[in-house]
Amino acid sequence: MNSKWNGQFSCFDLVACPADKKSDHVRAVVEAGGIEIGGSDFVVMAGPCAVESEKQLLQTAEAVAKAGARILRGGAYKPRSSPYSFQGLGVEGLKILRRARQLTGLAIVTEVMSEEDVELIAEYADIMQVGTRSMENYALLEALGSCGRPVLLKRGMTATLEELLRSAQIIAMAGNPKIILCERGIRTFETATRNTLDIAAVPVLKTVSHLPVIVDPSHAAGVRALVPVLARAAAVVGADGLIVEVHPFPEEALSDGDQSLTFHEFRSMMDDLEPYLDLQQRSRQLRPQLLAVGGVD
Ligand code: PEP
Ligand code: MN
């Protein structure tokens, strides 16, 4: 570990780490809906960007489960850049997600945008997703401290890794150590992709913290053709899993259709991952090496 990393990340107190701080840290395993994230399995979360209808979600749930996904994603409350875009079905969407869980056994991850919705969404979700636009919503992060559910914390699109870890620390210090970090691409000068996937974020985060790290190749790429290859890269550098957008008819999707995989494309992506998962074992087991203490602004 070089000293730059020591300095740069020294604000991250591994408050959530169950291990004795004087010994080597063990990696945290976050359990959600009976599934372990950060353990020996590479866990894939998949589903549409937004829950649009019962039919759309149930069809997708069945297809992704068959292809090997363990967790169903789908936004009921959507953060959209335009007020004219589809904002999500709200509670109706949550009920559809619950039905999909009953029918398929998949655990559910869905986004929470406001602290006022935490209690309601926690009744339906196995994992509470904090989107890129909410990483610095401190009232939300604090409320998630006592929600009783694991949190999938996405990196802000202009956030440094240190800032991501500070947000994680807020949730942990508010009482919830069950946090999964997610690299979903950051804003750079590059325009060929929607965001720039910071692939180094995975081994860096896994070196400086004990938390599981997953990758969202969909929001990083912005176009479906790039999603499988970014997923393979994520597997090789040691990610603990993926969150991927899948839609029965991407061209008709109410949000993020360009980056959503068809069922067939998702199945191929999953089949093609196998050899890359074999390669990843050494990187997955990176041991956190920093004993960082205090110093948060
Ligand atoms: C999403 O998962 O659909 C989403 C809005 O992601 P992000 O917050 O990373 O843009
Ligand atoms: Mn999306």
Image: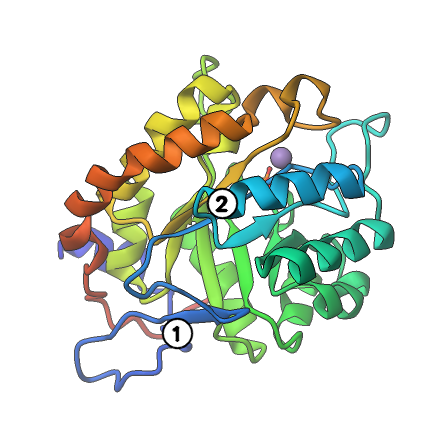
Looking at the picture, how far across and down is residue 175, in whole percent?
56, 80
Q: Is residue 30 left or right of residue 247?
A: left
Residue for point 30% across, 37% down: 273
Disc 1 element:
loop
Mark 1 and mark 2: span between their CA atoms? 45 Å
- Whether the residue carrying mark 1 lies under 8 Å from ligand 1 is answered with no
Q: Pick whichever, 161 or 179, lies toward us.
A: 179
Residue for point 24% across, 58% down: 207
- Front disc: 1 or 2: 2
- Of the two numbered discs 1 and 2 on the same chain, state the one appearing first in sequence: 2
Which amino acid does the dot numbered 2 rest on? Lys
Specify the quarter for ligand 2: top right
Q: Pick whichever, 234 or 68, lies toward us.
A: 68
Judge whether residue 27 can be spotted in this image.
Answer: yes
Looking at the picture, how far across and down is residue 167, in whole percent?
52, 60
Residue for point 79% across, 62% down: 117
Q: How is the image coloured?
A: rainbow
> With respect to residue 228, does 156 lie above or below?
below
Which amino acid does the dot numbered 1 rest on? Gly
Q: Is residue 40 left or right of residue 217?
A: left
Q: Which residue is mark 1?
A: 294
Q: Is residue 128 left or right of residue 12?
A: right
Q: Label 2 near label 1: C-beta < 8 Å? A: no
- Whether the residue carrying mark 2 lies under 8 Å from ligand 1 is answered with no
Quarter location, residue 12: bottom left
> With respect to residue 26, does 114 lie above or below?
above
Q: Which residue is mark 2?
A: 66
Q: Is residue 276 left or right of residue 128?
A: left
